[in-house]
Structures are given as structure tokens and as C-alpha cells.
Image: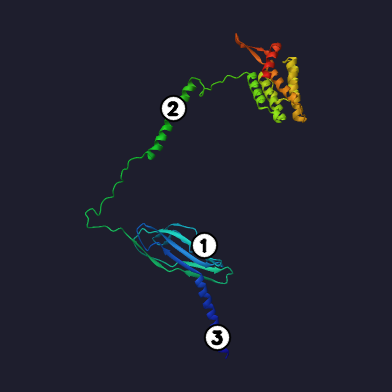
Amino acid sequence: MMSKKANRILLVFVLLIFVSFRGLSQSLTVKASVDTNLILIGDQIKLHLELTQPNNFQVNFPIFNDSIIDKIEILDRSNIDTIELDNKSLLLKQEYLITCFDSGIYEIPEFKFAFKSKDDSLTDTLKTRSFYLGVQTLKLDTTQANAIADIKLPIEAPITIQEALPYILYALAIIVFILLVIYFIRKRKKHEPIIKKKIKPKEPANVIALRELDKIKHEKYWQKGKVKYFHSIVTDVLRTYIENRFDIMAMEKTSQEIISSFTNNKLLDDDSFEKLKQILTLADFVKFAKYKPLPDDNEQSLNNAYKFVLNTKKVVDLYNPEKEEDKSDKNEIINDKSEEVVNN
């Protein structure tokens, strides 16, 4: 009785193993194929390897070096492309570009795919089916007299503009380079500058300052509430004017240092000095002490800026243009004129 029972158990165990391997073989498949089984010498075709596997298995593709078999050469290969079929299986593909330069019929052997489960409980090898690849030579028509002939010479095609354009550009570049070298050598021999700069006559300092003050007056900054900005740009115009007119680095000095410079040098008459002092002092109060001046104070600063520039500008003698007179010596004559310019 025990022997019959043992035989039954063994039979059930074998059936379970058969069913499990059958189920595994259905879910894990490999395939190898080519685009065509018949090619001419030197033709290039693709060898396709496909693998369908469960997610919980690790399968290794076969590895080749430079050829599949002798005389079947590998020109290129792709990476393994993975496609998820469902939550439990994957489709993996790889392609090889192959060719052959000898005629004949070649057997492409079986490709082996080694696989194992992730828990290493099952390991085995799957094989693809072998197949044949035929390689033919070119057929010659021996009935024709010129069936076998020498290699024809290359056909001479006319040169197009696109082909000639690079050479034309290169030639022009060489010509321009040679002309530039000749130009530089001649200039050097004559001790002349390579590039002559046109010197633009410098505008008088008072012309520049009055133009900037006109812009400020036209924009009406303090009337628009930009009081701090108004006083800042008025003082900047005067600082630039002082640098160009008196050679005092006013842009790098504080208001007190500018006033001290004129006090020590006595370059200004008392009226011009007081006007400059009023402009700089009020601007410092507005910028640093957050002082809010009255509209009359703002207007007075702009008028004093006009008067300061007009009273201190240099006057050119019409009979001797190279001689310039200091305008500060003629304050009484200019005051009436400056009042007219400011009012306008």
C-alpha cells in the first residue's frame, strides 16, 4: 500500500513541475529574425532579437563582438528597448545591423538567453530557433558582348555655385587680408595712425549745462512730486559744469568740499558763491535730512542754477577767439540777461 501511495505522490509532483514549466514557457519566450533571408553581397539587413519575460525574472541577452558567425559581420547595434506589456510582463528588443561579403548559404545558430528569477529559485537557458541566410553575387548576362567591361570613369558633373562659393569666399578673404597688411605697412612707414578719429569740437561747459537745465525745467520733476530726484539732478548738472569750467573734481566731492574749494581759491564773486551755496545746501537737506521744501524753494534752486552758469561762463572774444575772458568779472551786465533766460 505504501508503494502505491508513494507512486501517486511522485506522479502529482511531476505533474506540478510540468505545469509550472509549461506556464513559464508561455510567459517567457525568445525570438530571432532578419528582414530577409536572401541578400546580395554587401547588402545590409537587420537582425531582430525579441524577448518576452515576467517582471520577476532577470534575462541576459547574448553578447557578440564583431560578427554573428564567421563572415556575417556586425556593423552596428542598438540598445535594448524595453516595453511594458502589462503589470506582469515585459517585451525587450534589440537590433543588429549585419552584412556579408562572401556568397553562400549560412546557418544562423541558436541564440541563448540565460535567465533566473529574482529570488534565484529558478535558473535556466532559453534558445531561439536557428535559420538560414543566403548571400548571392550579381548575375552577369554573358549573352551580351559588353557583359564584362572595364570600370567606368567617374562622370564629370558641372560645378555648381554652392560648390564654388566657399572657394570664392576664401579667395576674397585672402585678398582683403593682403590689402590690410599693405595698408598697415604704409601707415607705419609714414608714422600715421591706422585709423583717423574725427575729433568732435568740445561744447562749452555752459552750453551743456544750460541744455540739461532746460530738460529739467521742461520735465517739471518737483511739480510731479519727484522733489528729491529734482534736487539730485540739478546738483549733478552743476557738479559736471564745475568740473568742465573750473577743473574742480566736483563729482567726487561733497557739497561742503565744493564750497570750501571756491572759498579757498576765490574763483567766484559773492553773488555766484551764495547761489551755489543755496543750491547745494538745500539739496543736502532734501536728500539726507528728508526736508520738504516749499515750491518757491524748488523754483529758486533752478533759477539760481541758471544764474550761476550764466554768471560764471567763459566769454569768447569775437576779435580774438583763442582768448577767453572770465564771465565772473562782468556780473552786472549778465544779471539782467540771466533773469530774462530763467523767466523764459
**Could you tell me which residue is drawn at 69 percent across and 22 percent down?**
238
Q: CA distance from mark 3 to mark 1?
A: 43 Å
Q: Position of residue 129 (x, y in %)?
A: 43, 69
Q: CA distance from mark 2 to mark 1?
A: 65 Å
Query: Residue 228 or 237: which is nearer the viewer?
Result: 228
Mark 2 is on which residue type? Leu
Query: For residue 83, which numbered disc appears in the image?
Result: 1
The residue lying furthest to the bottom in this view is 1
**Could you tell me which residue is drawn at 39 percent across and 40 percent down?**
162
Lower sequence index among marks 3 and 1 = 3
Q: CA distance from mark 2 to mark 3?
A: 106 Å
Q: Position of residue 260 (x, y in %)?
A: 75, 20
- Tag 3, which secondary structure? helix
Q: Is residue 9 left or right of residue 296?
A: left
Question: Residue 69 occupies which quadrant of the picture?
Answer: bottom left
Choose mark 2 or mark 1, whichever is in front.
1
Q: Residues within 10 Å of mark 3 (few under 14, many from 20)?
A: few
Query: Which residue matches tag 3?
Result: 8
- Tag 2, which secondary structure? helix
Query: Residue 118 or 188: which is nearer the viewer?
Result: 118
Query: Which residue matches tag 2?
Result: 179
Mark 3 is on which residue type? Arg
Examine the rendered structure and indicate whether residue 167 appears above or below residue 318.
below
Choose mark 3 or mark 1, whichever is in front.
1
Query: Residue 304 or 247: which is nearer the viewer?
Result: 304
**Could you tell me which residue is drawn at 53 percent across and 80 percent down?**
15
Lower sequence index among marks 2 and 3 = 3
Question: Residue 250 occupies which quadrant of the picture?
Answer: top right
Whether residue 223 is visible: yes
Lower sequence index among marks 2 and 1 = 1
Query: For residue 299, which numbered disc appears in the image?
Result: none
Query: Residue 131 or 227: which is nearer the viewer?
Result: 227
